[in-house]
Each structure stands twice: as structure tokens, then as C-alpha cells.
Image: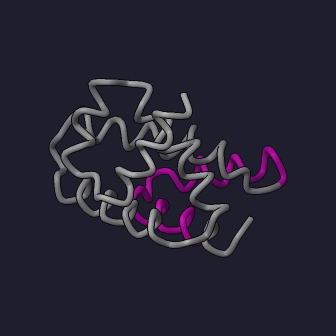
């Protein structure tokens, strides 16, 4: 796991401190940090819930601003993990994608386009 991937996980834990126990359980269960499992099973349900509820706009904006930073980071490993977990999951639900598009920055939108073309 790259340094940037570790930072991504830590940043997501800051956005969703209530997921810390689930994160620890995952690491204990698998004996290591499995990035895709943690992002898909722990963080993405929280992001989708936020988008569905639409109540904490400040947090949503902060998360998507961070996603734009990730999209611009230049770490190919993190961008790949980000694309196959966060972006593909958002693409899978058209209603959620429609909501998310309000917050997606230009670089992240470019990655979305790549994901959509790859499907």
C-alpha cells in the first residue's frame, strides 16, 4: 500500500470517525489493511447514505473536495484504487451519481468518464 493510500484511509476515517471500529475489525480479520474492502464495505455505504440524505452538505463538499485532491495526486496506485472502488460504486447507482455530480470536481469527472468508458 502506498503512502498516499494510507493517507486516504486516514482521511476517510476523519470524515467518518464512527467507522473506526469497523476499520479495526477489518484489519484484525484479514491481518492487514485491504484497501478495496475497507473503501467498498466501510466508507462507501457512509458516502452513499450522506448523498441520499442530502442533509450534511458541508461534509459532502469536503469529501468531494478531497476526492478532487486525490484525483490530482499523481499516485497511480491510489488513483486506481479510488477509481475501482469509489467511482465505480457511484456509477452503479444512477440516482446517487446524479446527486454526486453536483459536487464532483473537473479532474474527478475526468476519472468518472474513464470509469464509464471502461464499463
Q: Report the residue at 49% width, 61% height from top.
A: 13
Q: Report the residue at 49% width, 46% height from top.
A: 43
Name the quadrant of the C terminus: top right
Residue nearer the viewer, 65 or 28 = 65
Name the quadrant of the N terminus: bottom right
In which quarter of the view is residue 55 placed? Answer: top left
Residue nearer the viewer, 15 or 17 = 15
Q: Residue furthest front?
A: 117
Count of marks, rendered view:
0
Q: Is residue 23 left or right of residue 31?
A: left
41 is higher (above) or lower (below) than 109: above
Q: Report the residue at 22% width, 36% height from top.
A: 99
In which quarter of the view is residue 14 placed? Answer: bottom left
Q: Please, which colouring scheme is shown? A: one colour
Q: Position of residue 46 (x, y in %)?
A: 40, 42
State whether the magenta stretch is mostly helix, strand or loop: helix
Q: Position of residue 31 (x, y in %)?
A: 84, 53
Q: Is residue 24 left or right of residue 29?
A: left
Q: Which residues are magenta?
A: 7-31
15 drawn magenta: yes
23 drawn magenta: yes
Q: Report the residue at 42% width, 44% height from top.
A: 112
Amino acid at each position: 500500500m502506498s503512502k498516499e493510500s494510507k493517507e486516504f484511509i486516514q482521511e476517510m476515517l476523519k470524515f467518518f470517525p464512527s467507522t473506526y471500529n469497523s476499520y479495526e475489525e477489518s484489519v484484525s480479520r484479514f491481518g492487514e489493511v485491504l484497501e478495496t474492502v475497507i473503501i467498498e464495505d466501510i466508507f462507501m455505504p457512509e458516502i452513499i447514505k450522506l448523498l441520499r440524505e442530502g442533509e450534511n452538505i458541508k461534509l459532502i463538499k469536503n469529501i468531494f473536495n478531497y476526492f478532487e485532491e486525490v484525483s490530482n495526486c499523481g499516485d497511480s496506485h491510489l488513483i486506481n484504487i479510488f477509481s475501482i472502488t469509489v467511482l465505480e460504486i457511484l456509477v452503479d447507482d444512477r440516482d446517487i451519481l446524479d446527486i454526486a455530480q453536483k459536487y464532483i470536481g473537473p479532474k474527478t469527472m475526468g476519472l468518472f468518464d474513464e470509469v464509464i468508458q471502461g464499463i
